[in-house]
Image (cartoon, helix red, strand yellow):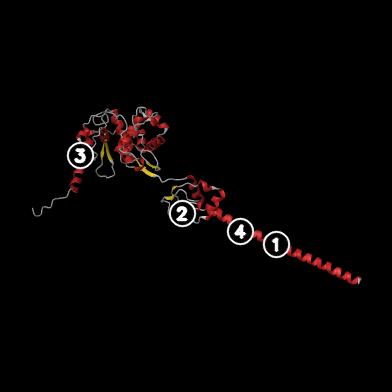
Amino acid sequence: MGRTANKSGELSLNLTIGLFFALMTVMKKRRKLIALILATTFVAIAGVLLWIYLELRSPIQHDKAGKHIEISRGLAPSQILDKLASEGIIRRPWPLLAYIKLTGAGSRLKAGEYRFSSPISPLGVLKKLEEGEERLSRFTIIEGWSRFEIAAAMTRIPELKLENNEQALALMSDTSAIRDLDPDADNLEGYLFADTYNFPPDSTPESMVAAMVKRFRQQWKPEWTEKARALGMSPRQIVTVASLIETEAKLPEERPVIASVIYNRIKKQMALGVDSSVIYASKLAGKWRDDGKVYRSDLDRQSPYNTRLNVGLPPGPIASPSLSSLQAALNPSESSYLYYVREPARDDGAHNFYDNAADFERGVQALRNWERERDARSTPTTNQAGQ
């Protein structure tokens, strides 16, 4: 009996030990399986995160770069991204949506009318949505326009709500922004810089005028004031010369030469005879017919701006000069020229320059002959048959 009992005990012990080792083996295999599962999960998560990282930063080409995309007020981030995906601005909404939720950027998205450059990354899209953007209207001031043309163009912009040109012109009488540069100015003629401007729909006429003057101040370099003084001129006189150059010159390379003609005539106490100043005098008097012709009544008009009747510069600028005309006024060519007339053989606005009246008169006659021949060619001939 005792021996049988001992054998049973040994059997039980061996069985227990076997079960223990079997359990340990199973546990080891399970740990390896769990570790494998965890490692696989980690790799998968890391792969997804890397993919999202690259997805958010990869620029996307699209064909809507010139189109405004309206993001209306009240849209949820998911709705905004769905719209952008449908427009092809982003490939798929969910990576950027996940990033927005993770960073809390949803509350910073702004409504507006956006133009997205191409290519652009999803994070670039998000940055624009956080900054906000409105459609900008383009307003262009043509080089050589006077404040009268600028006022008329502003009046044609519905958003500015100007009833007539006079309302715009009145805003151009505030010279506080240029007083340090031109204390004698009683209006902003010449200081409304010719350029293309962008403005939001809620812009005011006042803000537009301020933007034009600000652009002029950005172009006018501080050393130009000293350069003007070295020429014996004030900044106002330089802007006046530049405005005359702007209305006379068509080719950039001729601007310094025309500047030399103006300065040479001033030195010799000769009337400048610039027709654009005659036209400006008529505009001031409210008599300009705006048909492209200068009439005898314009030429005879008594006005300090009429440079056919008065020697020297007009009292102030007559138009908005370009940067190149300002530079030409400050850096005239060295020449003995006193006259110029259009070159009839060219259609690009080129001039012939002269230092004596006789050559100038021959140049004028050549131009008149060419004009008569041109007009004759353009006039239909009468059919003599049957008469």
- The mark found on residue 32 in the picture is 1
* In-image side of 297 versus 98 (left or right): left
Q: Amino acid at mark 2?
A: Lys
Among numbered discs 1 and 3, the one appearing first in the sequence: 1
- In this rendering, which labeled residue sits more in front, label 4 or label 2? 2
- The mark found on residue 365 in the picture is 3
- In this rendering, which labeled residue sits more in front, label 1 or label 3? 1
- The mark found on residue 44 in the picture is 4
Among numbered discs 2 and 3, the one appearing first in the sequence: 2
Q: Amino acid at mark 1?
A: Lys
Residue 343's place in the image compared with 301, above or below, is below
Among numbered discs 1 and 4, the one appearing first in the sequence: 1
Tag count: 4
Q: Which residue is mark 2?
A: 83
- In this rendering, which labeled residue sits more in front, label 4 or label 3? 4
Quarter of the figure with the N terminus: bottom right
Q: Position of residue 130 (x, y in %)?
A: 49, 46
What residue lies at 20% left-to-right and 43% top-to-bottom?
Answer: 371
Distance between mark 4 and mark 2 Cα atoms: 30 Å
Among numbered discs 4 and 3, the one appearing first in the sequence: 4
Is disc 1 placed on a helix, strand or loop?
helix
* In-image side of 212 versus 9 (left or right): left
| Mark 2 touches mark 3? (CB < 8 Å) | no
* In-image side of 24 versus 274 (left or right): right
Quadrant of res 349 = top left
| Mark 1 touches mark 3? (CB < 8 Å) | no
Q: Amino acid at mark 3?
A: Gln
